[in-house]
Image (spheres, rainbow, N blue to C red):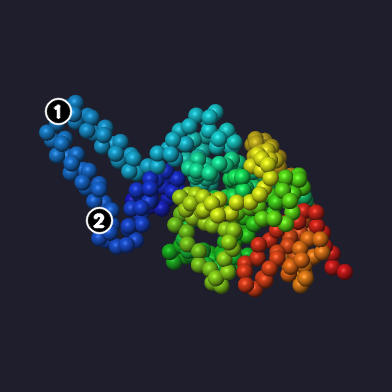
Amino acid sequence: MLDLFMNSIFFQTFGSGFIKGFKKFQRLGMWAYFLALLPFFVIMVCYQGSYDKATWIEKILLTALLLVILFLLVFDVRAVACFFEKPEESEYFLATGVTRKEVLNDKGLLGEFNAYVMSRKLKVPHKTLFNVCVPMPNGNYQEVDAIIITDNWLYVVECKNRGGVFTGNFEDKNWVQKIGSKTHSVYNVYLQNQDHITAIEYFLQSKGVITAGDPYCYSTMLTGGDLQLSVTNNRVPIDFAFGDASFISSQIASVENRRTENRGENFMDRVYMALLPYALLDKKKRDHMQATRKELSDKGGLKKGEYHYYYFENGIPGITDEETVLRENRVYTQISTGNQDDTFPIWKTMANLKYAER
């Protein structure tokens, strides 16, 4: 029962750092397990000894103190505080329109709420948008769980409640997920989030908020389970991180410290205001968008098609003078520069570039 709780998305959202550390002790063996439990035994022994000698008023105070200590050990105070914020004062509840009851009863919403808790813990200046329906030029849209915007980067957050061991490569369309003795195929989460990033870059370029050819987005997967990824060819993108809220927070802080870009004046505000209208959609509007998407999809109007690749040894005049690979489908055109055999390709969306082989 304890292990079930500690592996749940509820624990990943509301569990304290002490309890999460205790979970790591479990993996080190039985002695480490009991060592981690030692503080609880000490607390209970001290409590029982004091309780036996106390008056009835002291017993009430001691019991209240014990409950407070246990609460602080078990629960993340910041996460609990975020959950009990007044709806009219909560950035998350205002943006999404969901209720506390819905958060607790829906694993997907609880995962997204975890992104809100993580954003509240970040110590770098930022703004956060939730459930952003980024429009695509073919009439479709990409629904992004959360986007954390700083003065330097857009951290595109995909919230997953999955656990287990994933095997595959970042270029593969599907990964193999193994939980216990069962395995099944799942869509590559990295590629899924790259679709989100491509839509964001294209949209912001079309609005003149960002320039083409520069990297602006950092891909993150916020996990609600004990997830491990085994990459078979060791080619790992430098703009991707996955893990729990604590790890992703540390990654964002690290990226902000080492990669400062000149984005121009009020970059954070410009990006936030451009994307904000697509995060403030009520249920009626979202239902209409889904119905429209289904209608277009049934008619075959949303097919992006496969990417076609073109190689330019000396670059593309007016765009880049180094070795370049260009790819395009029916919707997007992207380029990647540098030696493709030595590094993982970073694709840059070019909203105003179209290439036809002659």
Please, what secondary structure does the residue beneath circle 1 have?
loop
| Residue at screen point 14% across, 39% down | 49
50 relative to 326 in the view: left or right: left
CA gap, disc 1 to disc 2? 33 Å
Compare residues 232 and 346 and report the one nearer the observer: 346
Residue at image coords 26%, 37% = 66
What x and y, as percent, mark residue 284? 67, 35
In the rendering, at what x and y percent does residue 155 appear? 59, 50
Q: Which label is found at residue 6?
A: none
The first of marks 1 and 2 along the sequence is 2
Which residue reaches farthest right?
Answer: 358
Relative placement, left or right, of 204 versus 250 is right
Q: Residues within 10 Å of mark 2 (few under 14, many from 20)?
A: some
Label 2 element class: helix
Q: How many numbered marks are there?
A: 2
Crowding at mark 1 (Cα within 10 Å: few <14, some 14-19, many 20+)? few
Viewer can see residue 286: no
Query: Farthest top residue?
Result: 57
Horizontally, residue 120 falls left or right of residue 69, namely: right
Q: Quadrant of residue 65?
A: top left
Identify the amino acid type marked 2.
Phe
Residue at image point 49% right, 49% down: 249
Query: Which residue is labeled 1 in the image?
Result: 55
Q: Is residue 239 left or right of residue 301?
A: left
Query: 231 or 205, which is in the foreground?
Result: 205
Residue visible at 65% across and 52% down in the picture: 216
Residue 26 drawn at (x, y percent)? 32, 58
Label 2, on which residue?
34
Q: Are marks 1 and 2 in contact (CB under 8 Å)?
A: no
Disc 1 residue type (three-letter) = Thr
